[in-house]
Amino acid sequence: AGTLDIQCPPGYYELSFGSGDRTKCKMCPSGFHCTGGDAASTKPCNVQSTTVDRGSTSSDQCLCDVGYYMGPSRSCLACPQGTLKGYIGDAESCSSSCPRGTTSNQGTAYARDCYCSGQDRRYFDTDPSSDGFVCVSSTQLDSTFA
């Protein structure tokens, strides 16, 4: 009896299943790249990077994740505090900022994750919408409800 040697095309990896080590080629998942060939396997993108689509064939298709930008050393770095990047791509900076009077932690992607800034974080957002901000100090709140 002969053995069937399966070679997966680029963008696919080899999956063994069942008895007798049957194999089939599956499309490479997002966040990985697969070169194909004999014993094709998945290779993860570097830290803080991912792929836009399934079926990626090389590490060149791994791009900086949301909240990260391409640093000078060609590695993905967290957006600085108060800045945002809400898309996958190799931008060289995080070009969006939190709304006036707010800031964010490093690696933030969206304005909804910004928070009111102020001394000792004693400012609170009183706007009920997820991405609107009305920052009020705790002393203003105390006098409102006194």
Image (tube, grey):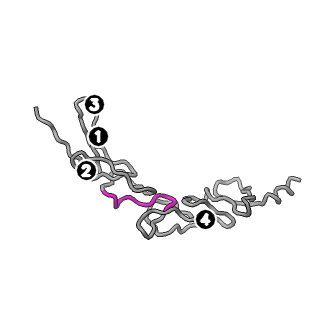
Say which residue appears at 26% left-offset and 47% top-offset.
40
Q: Earlier in the sequence, mark 2 or mark 3?
A: 3
Q: Amino acid at mark 3?
A: Gly
For the residues bearing labels 2 and 4, Cβ distance under 8 angstroms: no
Say which residue appears at 67% left-offset and 54% top-offset.
129
Q: Amino acid at mark 1?
A: Leu
Callout 4: few (<14), some (14-19), or many (20+) C-alpha neighbours within 10 Å? many
Q: Residue furthest top?
A: 19
Element marked by disc 2: loop
Where are the magenta residues, as a range? 58-68
Element marked by disc 3: loop
Is 132 on the left or on the right of 44, as rendered?
right
Query: Where residue 18 sits in the image (x, y, percent)?
Result: 28, 30
Is 123 on the left or on the right of 51, as rendered?
right
Q: Is residue 59 magenta?
A: yes
Pointer 2: what residue? 36
Element marked by disc 4: loop
Q: Quadrant of residue 81?
A: bottom right
Q: Earlier in the sequence, mark 2 or mark 4?
A: 2
Q: Quadrant of residue 106?
A: bottom right
Q: Which mark is residue 18?
A: 3
Q: Amino acid at mark 2?
A: Gly
- Real-space Cα separation, disc 2 to disc 3, in angstroms: 21 Å
Q: Amino acid at mark 4?
A: Gly
Q: Earlier in the sequence, mark 2 or mark 1?
A: 1
Pointer 1: what residue? 15
- Real-space Cα separation, disc 1 to disc 3, in angstroms: 10 Å
Q: Earlier in the sequence, mark 1 or mark 4?
A: 1
Q: Is residue 18 magenta?
A: no
Q: Which mark is residue 82?
A: 4
